[in-house]
Image (spheres, coloured by chain):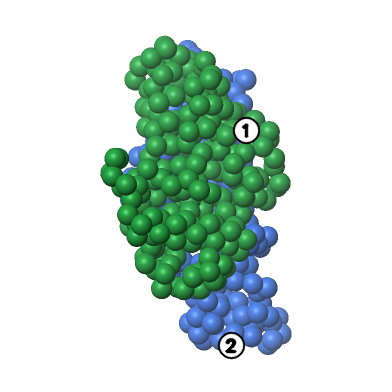
């Protein structure tokens, strides 16, 4: 890698780290690219040679976080034991535990993804393919194990589960809920949703 | 939008003073202008200065009725909740079963908000970043609508369609969140009324599937 490329990579890394901290502290709208540049110790111009917009910076911050989260999940998922509903609970608990370490950042991301004007650079939620696949895998194991109905509408179940998972984060804004509170609610919601796909003995 | 919420009016039987009436009219002018600008420019894009100008008054006059932009936005959204509530209640009352009643009341809501989609979107976005005080106020405004969903579910329990130990609150919240989540489809993928309603019906089906089995 040439000197220029190395510098560009370094700038990119600093900008992403600065943006992550600022979005976490103050949210998306309130954070300016100038603030990001200042904190990263780079010129505002440099920010824009690497990223097209503030929204793109946020998207990249979240993509990078996903790498860390999925490394953790992929380690854990094959070793999960017990009834399918409990394996699903474990996966969702890991999500809450991870994201709640930077709760404001995640909430800022959700807010931005509904933001105005629509910005294609902020990836719409719920399109997280890896999570859908991971959940789908657990349900397939459940069908094989006999605690999930073979004719269960798996995609619809996963969609409902993901909707509940994301919208639970509103309780962070509304009630100052922590990871434990969100997990407790998710556990009940999962139990409820799972009744619709559970195999009868 | 001329609907004046009952809570704003003076005690029943007592006529409004001219001053109070003037204040109400000012308030309504500001709300109308605010709604138009929030719809056109979103929450961040609309300023108090522009809203005041559009209403033909000073920013001072706006601040006499509303504490800040967040407060003003909240009141626009809540006025819309109140405007749709009666129609939603009537639509639900016309249906025999729980699924039908829920579908009917949310159809009214979707139809209303699709006509002003940018505002609905702004409303959802802002709800993720409100202050606790604004959140409290919004929750108050939303209560009758959430109550309507709970009523429909409770009637289902009474009819034996749903189990007696149904967690009405949890299910009501999940249904409400599903309703909101579909605005993403409208905004990003251009889904129209029928598609949104069909999707919500499927989601409600999943949410109630386990409960129905237990009934």
Residue at image x 69%, y 86%? Answer: A4
Q: Position of residue B15 (x, y in %)?
A: 32, 47
Give the position of the C terminus of chain B as an image quadrant: top left
* In the depicted structure, whether residue B174 falls above or below residue B126: above
| Residues at marks 1 and 2 touching, judged by CB atoms closer than 8 Å | no
Q: Position of residue A43 (x, y in %)?
A: 58, 88
Secondary structure beneath disc 1? helix
Q: Quadrant of residue B168?
A: top left
Q: Nearer the viewer, residue B82 or B201?
A: B82
In the picture, which chain is green? B
Residue at image x 34%, y 20%? Answer: B165
Q: Residues within 10 Å of mark 2 (few under 14, many from 20)?
A: some
Label 2 lies in what chain?
A
In the picture, which chain is blue? A
Q: Which mark is residue B6?
A: none
Q: What residue did someone put label 2 on?
A: A43
Q: What residue did someone put label 1 on?
A: B197
Q: Nearer the viewer, residue A147 or A81?
A: A147
Q: Nearer the viewer, residue B1 or A74?
A: B1
């Amino acid at each position: 890698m040439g000197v220029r490329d190395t510098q560009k990579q370094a700038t990119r890394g600093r900008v992403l780290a600065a943006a992550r901290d600022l979005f976490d502290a103050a949210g998306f709208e309130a954070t300016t690219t100038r603030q990001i540049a200042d904190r990263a110790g780079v010129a505002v111009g440099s920010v824009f040679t690497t990223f097209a917009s503030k929204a793109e910076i946020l998207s990249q911050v979240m993509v990078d976080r996903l790498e860390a989260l999925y490394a953790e999940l992929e380690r854990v998922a094959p070793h999960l034991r017990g009834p399918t509903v409990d394996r699903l609970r474990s996966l969702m608990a890991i999500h809450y535990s991870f994201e709640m370490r930077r709760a404001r950042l995640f909430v800022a991301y959700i807010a931005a993804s509904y933001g105005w004007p629509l910005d294609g650079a902020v990836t719409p939620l719920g399109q997280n393919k890896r999570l859908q696949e991971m959940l789908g895998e657990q349900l397939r194991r459940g069908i094989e194990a006999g605690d999930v109905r073979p004719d269960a509408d798996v995609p619809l179940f996963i969609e409902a589960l993901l909707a509940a998972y994301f919208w639970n984060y509103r309780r962070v804004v509304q009630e100052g809920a922590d990871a434990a509170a969100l997990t407790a609610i998710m556990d009940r919601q999962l139990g409820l949703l799972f009744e619709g796909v559970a195999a009868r003995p | 939008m001329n609907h004046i919420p009952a809570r704003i009016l003076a005690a029943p039987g007592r006529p409004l003073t001219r001053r109070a009436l003037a204040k109400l009219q000012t308030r309504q002018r500001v709300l109308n202008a605010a709604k138009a600008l929030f719809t056109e420019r979103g929450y961040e894009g609309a300023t108090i200065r522009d809203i005041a100008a559009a209403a033909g008054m000073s920013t001072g006059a706006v601040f006499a009725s509303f504490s800040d932009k967040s407060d003003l936005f909240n009141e626009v959204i809540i006025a819309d909740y109140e405007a749709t509530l009666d129609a939603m209640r009537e639509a639900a009352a016309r249906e025999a079963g729980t699924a039908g009643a829920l579908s009917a009341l949310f159809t009214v809501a979707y139809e209303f908000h699709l006509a002003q989609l940018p505002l609905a979107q702004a409303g959802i976005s802002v709800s993720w970043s409100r202050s606790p005080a604004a959140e409290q106020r919004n929750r108050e405004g939303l209560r009758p609508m959430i109550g309507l969903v709970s009523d429909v579910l409770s009637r289902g329990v009474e009819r034996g369609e749903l189990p007696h130990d149904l967690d009405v609150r949890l299910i009501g919240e999940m249904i409400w969140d599903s309703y909101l989540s579909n605005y993403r489809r409208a905004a990003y993928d251009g889904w129209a009324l029928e598609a949104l309603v069909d999707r919500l019906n499927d989601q409600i089906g999943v949410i109630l599937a386990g409960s129905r089995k237990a009934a």
